Amino acid sequence: MRLVLPLVAFAAAIAVPVIAQNAPQVPGQPDKTRVAAGTYAADSAHTMVVWEVDHLGFSKYSGIFGDVTGTLVLDPANPAAAKVDVTIPVAKVTTANAGLTAHLLRAGKDGGKPDFFGAAPADAKFVSTSVVLDDDGDEAKVTGNLTLNGVTKPVTLDVDFHGAGTGMTKKETVGFQAETTIRRSDFGIAYGIPMVSDEVELEIHAAFEKQ
């Protein structure tokens, strides 16, 4: 027994580093040195805008805009010059309830104004106008013009660098997450306020592949 325990400990000391060394790693890592300069296209399958409102003061309710398209131009040597231009298809909004999704896209009654987006809503669009980085270079405030429901307003996103590397498509990929809060009444969507909050929290998860 006195010999077995030291042998087990010795074997474990050798095995742990070997297992760790051979363990698979995800391709994207939070390493800014992996970011390559160039023009990137949004990975539509893995980019989404999650929105959240307060419902009657009882609970939060969220939905998703997916199939985002657009471009990101960046240069690690000059990250403040980055440009993003993305389009969000409002007509493809998704919620956890089919009736609510239908309500969001329902035409106005008797030809009147719809409660939310209406039956054939135009795509939303965000075009950046400035990028201000923090001292570490992994967080930024990205200001741009958001066009939603036919109204354009300036919006500032708090953006965090998430990771970079070579993705499953063998393309260099970068990922970010961002958040902001808008007032939907600013964009002409005032139905149900204050029972359904005017403030809409937006959480963005975005991946871009180098072209």
Image (cartoon, helix red, strand yellow):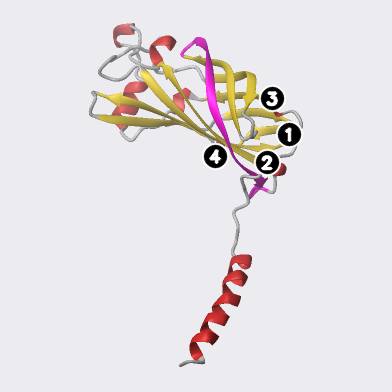
Give the mark nearer the N terminus: 4 vs 1: 4
Residue occupied by mark 4? 45
The question of residue 151 being in magenta is answered with yes
Q: Residue at x 31, y 13 (%)?
A: 191
What whole-number distance in Å separates the C-alpha atoms at marks 1 and 3?
9 Å
Give the mark nearer the N terminus: 2 vs 4: 2
In which quadrant will I find the C terminus? top right
Q: Which mark is residue 76?
A: 1
Q: Position of residue 176 (x, y in %)?
A: 57, 36
Which of the two marks, 3 or 4, is nearer to us in this view? 3
Q: Residue at x 76, y 32 (%)?
A: 77
What whole-number distance in Å separates the C-alpha atoms at marks 2 and 1?
8 Å
Which contiguous range is marked in magenta?
A: 149-169
Q: Residue at x 42, y 10 (%)?
A: 186
Residue occupied by mark 2? 32
User: Which corner quadrant of the image does residue 105 belong to?
Assistant: top left
* Front residue (pair 188, 17): 17
Q: Check disc 4 and report its element: helix, strand or loop.
A: helix
Q: Position of residue 70 (x, y in %)?
A: 62, 27
What whole-number distance in Å separates the C-alpha atoms at marks 4 and 1?
25 Å
Q: Residues within 10 Å of mark 1 (few under 14, many from 20)?
A: some
Give the mark nearer the N terminus: 3 vs 4: 4
Amino acid on which disc 4 is placed: Ala
Q: Check disc 3 and report its element: helix, strand or loop.
A: helix
Q: Check disc 1 and report its element: helix, strand or loop.
A: loop
